[in-house]
Image (cartoon, rainbow, N blue to C red):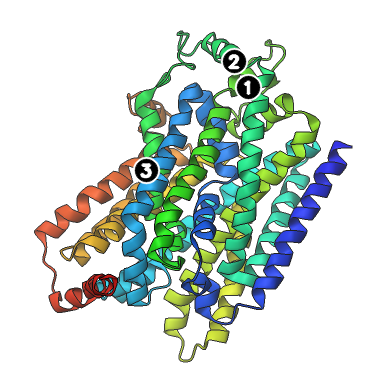
Amino acid sequence: MTTAITIGMIIIYVAIMMGIGVYTAKQTHSVNDFVLGGRNVGSWLTAFAYGTSYFSAVVFIGYAGQFGWTYGISAAWIGVGNAILGSLLAWIVLGRRTRIMTQSLGAKTMPEYFERRWNSKALKIAAAIIVFIFLIPYTASVYNGLSRLFNMAFQIESEGAYKIIIVVMALLTAIYVILGGYAATAINDFIQGIVMLIGIAAVVICTIQNQGGWTEAVASLGEIEVNSKINTLNSVFGPDPLNLLGVVILTSLGTWGLPQMVHKFYAIKSENAIKKGAVISTLFALVVAGGSYLLGGFDRLFCTLDSNESGKALISTLSNGKPEYDAMIPSLLNTALPDLLIGLVVVLVLSASMSTLSSLVLTSSSTLTIDLICPNMKKCSEKKEMIIMRILIAVFLIVSVLIAFNKNASISTLMSYSWGALAGAFLGPFMYGLFSKKVTKSAVWTSFITGVGLTLVHMFLFGFGWFPELSKAAASFPLNLASPINAGAVAMILSLILVPLVSACTKVKDTAYVEEVFQCYAVKSEKAE
């Protein structure tokens, strides 16, 4: 009965999603419509698109499971950071200037922004390559989380079924994004966001009630020993505040430099819509991210690594020696939720993940088409440009699916390397480039090389398990140097430091061009008066 209800809810959801794709396809006539929705998307749709692109199965299944297990209820601080730093401040600092400058420059993608802001085709090509390569592991991590949830809901354990689920999700994403582009994703994101808000609230309440209410659940959590200490998993800052801060920085500051996130500011309708969107997206993040990480904080009450401990789901250890963090939230849900709510959770995570996937594939395909392929073709009409983008959506999804087939690649690791490289490369140049005329090409190149270089070096040393002794030594520091999360956070902070530092040591060569670029703000101010 429960399986039938779950399948029924999924069918209804997919039908609505496909219907929106068909509807918006009739209104998508140009590249501008396909990539930016005609730059005419309102505050509610943009805010929900931002939030649903931000949070997916990566957060709900992977990050909530791992960091809830590691930090207890203090993991909820990650959600607070996501709301304040990752949403509110990002909208306030970047929203208006991003919209004005990208519209003035005619930039539809982040690489195109780099080209036209610094008058450099080389920067555009480098940025486009970085975007395409490092969005792939993030997409794979979303598929990984989705498949695990479906395994839990339908009791599917075979390797073949795992792969089939991933392929079906990729096909569904491809269909509605290929049909309607950004307009389809924005409308779907709004519906998906409502499902996420209702679902998260219901799941958190049921989980806490399953343990006898808030007071009893927190008390039970405090009895669990971590490093021979009790009352740490139920404390305000948890057992490891320093490394918790690294997670907050990666998952919050990262949005400022991710192309699929700042892209939302390109497409928003007006400055008033930005003000409203800032409030809406912040509240959305508080509920969805805060609720997800708080939920994860209780996973030790439902899961165990000890086969002698009864009453809890036994979590296996992977071949790399780490606990299977990605299985923790599905196990928690299977134990804590009434059967009827399982269907809602499946649709909830499906909604969150499909919205993120659509944003990722649209960003990647549009970047490759607009910034790499069409500029090198003799003739590239808008019709041909849209055909190429749609083909690349399929290619991007196929590559991501192949990576997702590797179950040993944990969700958090894939996402951390993706966000670390992208935001580590783009954060400083993108943000400072909106505000300062003094940012030089050399500073932009320095950030690109540092962000990508640090990520690749860390991946080589620690990501593949080739140097276990080195990994063990690096993990023994107060700030775990073997963690891809901390590496990503360091890359972002370095980008913010290096861009102004290198700019101070180098000179802007084409000052007349830069003055012309920044004229857009003066023109906007005059119109406002």
Query: In the rendered structure, are the residues bearing label 2 and label 3 in contact, judged by CB atoms less than 8 Å apart?
Result: no
**CA distance for labels 1 and 3:** 27 Å
What residue sits 35% from the left and 33% below the top? 481
Identified at 21% across, 48% down, the residue is: 497
Q: Amino acid at mark 1?
A: Ile
Tell me residue 379's x, y (percent): 48, 91
Residue 225 place in picture, x, y as percent? 51, 10
Say if 281 sits above or below 222 in the image: below
Camera-side residue of 276 and 229: 276
Find disc 3 in the rendering and name its residue: 85
Q: Is residue 247 visible to us here? A: yes
Q: Distance between the Cα atoms at labels 2 and 3? A: 29 Å
Q: Residue beneath label 1, please?
A: 208
Q: Which is nearer the eye, 171 or 22? A: 22
**What type is the residue that disc 3 sits on?**
Leu
Dot 3 falls on a residue whose secondary structure is helix
